[in-house]
Image (spheres, helix red, strand yellow):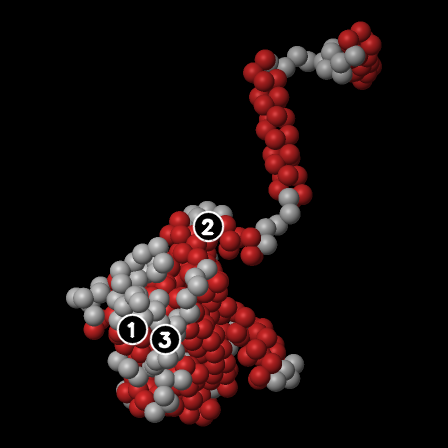
Amino acid sequence: MQKDYRNAGNDHTENLAEGVAATGDYTAGAVPLPATGLINAREEEVVAAQEFEETTRIATKRPMKKFQLYLRRFLRNKLAVVGTIIFLCLVVIALFGSFVTPWAFDEPDFLALSEPPSSEHWFGTSSSGTDLFAMVVHGLGRSLTIAVIVSCATTAIAAFVGAAAALLGGRPERVILSIIHFLLVIPSFLLIALMVSGSGGDWKVLTVVLILFGWVYYSRVIWSMCISLREREYIKAARYMGVSPFRTVVRHMIPNIGSLLIINLTLGVVSTVMSETGLSFLGLGVKIPDVSLGTLLSSGANSLQSSPWEFYFPAAVLTCLTVSMAFIADGLRDALDPNSNAGGRA
């Protein structure tokens, strides 16, 4: 019986060797598989090869940088792109618009008083004969200068104060929050009006006063967000390693709320422009001989019936500025917020 098994095994080995020698196929001489089994095996091999190629391609592909991801998500928002183009055009006009007109913003043309738009005066002239285009260009530059300085300064102060209050905790936190809540309650607009009323229309004084009262609300918002950050592992590790509170706030807490700060910075430009325009419109901000968009709107409102172009052109520029910044802020929010689906898939 044992010999029969050996002979059967030898016969099977000889048949397999003969099949390989004759066809070059190791499956020759073996037990034939069903046709469906061969097809399924080949399909599995093809699928496995495709999965391997896809895995290799993904593994060898360079990871996308954060800036590229944010930029692609931002560009998917069409209104944000339109707002960016409008804002860049306004910046170019504010920087280089004075070089394309022969008139200065404080140079009157006594032969053209309250003239409508023409080839010589593109936006017309004011009641004193001043070229309105030159005044709009200068006023736009002045309003943008105030808005950018105030927005950057208030965002930086609010970020540091709010993050420091959340990190320190205890009594320092209660003292800082008491000051913030007190400043939120008092009528800041009236205080700003009183402080700038005797400045003679100096835009630098107006900028400083707006900074003094502009950081309060943002710091309260940032404090509420940093409360959760102070319980993170890397903040606790920095404390245990003896890292100073100042370094912890600057290096660890503020960078982790960067998306919120960027949005606040963008919206701060809009709110500052509106504040400056309102104060100048009431005669409490920038005053003649210097001009801003608020000053132009104030003077144009007085002559709206006789020369409406004095009001409509500055109003159109102000509307373009505020709307473009609002679109940009909306696009930045969608691009920087990982939970937002408004920007589409990157």
Q: Position of residue 99 (x, y in %)?
A: 48, 63
Q: Which mark is residue 291?
A: 3
Q: Secondary structure at mark 1?
A: loop
Is there any visible trace of residue 319 in the rendered image? no
2 vs 1, front mark: 1
Q: Neighbour class for label 1 at 10 Å: few (<14), some, many (≥20)?
A: some
Q: Which of the pair 230/244 is nearer the observer?
A: 244
- The alpha-carbon separation of the residues under discs 3 and 2 comes to 35 Å
Q: Tell me the kind of residue under disc 1.
A: Ser
- 247 vs 296: above or below: below
Q: Tell me the kind of residue under disc 3.
A: Val
- The alpha-carbon separation of the residues under discs 3 and 1 comes to 14 Å
Q: Residue at x 62, y 42 (%)?
A: 58
Q: Secondary structure at mark 3?
A: loop
- The alpha-carbon separation of the residues under discs 2 and 1 comes to 45 Å
Is there any visible trace of residue 287 in the rendered image? yes
Q: Tell me the kind of residue under disc 2.
A: Leu
Q: Position of residue 177 (x, y in %)?
A: 39, 87
Q: Which residue is mark 2?
A: 75
In the image: residue 150, left or right of residue 293? right
Q: Residue at x 36, y 58 (%)?
A: 120
**N-terminal-most mark, 3 or 1:** 1
Q: Position of residue 346 (x, y in %)?
A: 49, 48
Q: Residue at x 49, y 70 (%)?
A: 257
Q: Which of the pair 302/242 is nearer the observer?
A: 302
CB of mark 3 within 8 Å of CB of mark 2?
no
Q: Which of the pair 103/99 is nearer the observer?
A: 103
Q: Secondary structure at mark 2?
A: helix
- 211 vs 69: above or below: below
Q: Which mark is residue 128?
A: 1
**N-terminal-most mark, 2 or 1:** 2
